[in-house]
Amino acid sequence: MGRAILTIIGILLAIWLLFTVLGMLISALKFLLWLGVLAVIGAVIVTVISKMAKS
C-alpha cells in the first residue's frame, strides 16, 4: 500500500515539475520576444534619426 501511495505522489510531482518547467520556458520565450521587439524598434528609431540628420 505504501509503495502505491509513493508511486502516485511521484507521478503527481513529476507532472507538477513538467508544468512548472513548461511555464518557465514559455515565460522566458515571451520575455525574449518582447526584448527582440524593443530592439527592432530601437534600431528603426536610430535609422530614421540618422537618415534625417544626413538630409
Image: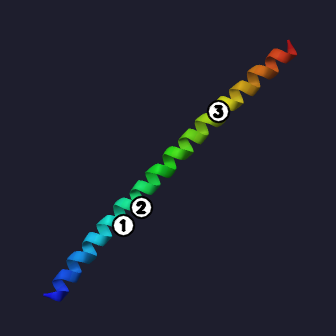
Give, as a three-letter code, the residue at label 1. Leu
Q: Residue at x 45, y 56 (%)?
A: 24
Q: Residue at x 31, y 70 (%)?
A: 14
Figure quadrant of residue 45:
top right
Q: Which residue is mark 2?
A: 21
Give, as a three-letter code, the residue at label 2. Val
The quadrant in which the C terminus is found is top right
Q: Residue at x 22, y 80 (%)?
A: 7
Q: Is residue 31 above or below residue 17?
A: above
Q: Is residue 9 above or below residue 17?
A: below
Extreme left residue here?
1
Relative to 51, 27 lies left or right: left
Labels 1, 3: front one: 1
Counting residues from the start of the chain, the first of labels 1 and 3 encountered is 1
SS for dot 3: helix
Relative to 3, 35 lies left or right: right
Q: Are marks 1 and 2 in contact (CB under 8 Å)?
A: yes
Q: Which residue is mark 1?
A: 17
SS for dot 2: helix
Figure quadrant of residue 48:
top right
Measure the C-alpha gap from mark 1 to mark 3: 35 Å
**Label drawn at residue 35:** none
What is the crowding at mark 2: few (fewer than 14 residues within 10 Å), some, or many (at least 20)? few
**Label drawn at residue 40:** 3
Extreme top residue here?
55
What is the crowding at mark 3: few (fewer than 14 residues within 10 Å), some, or many (at least 20)? few
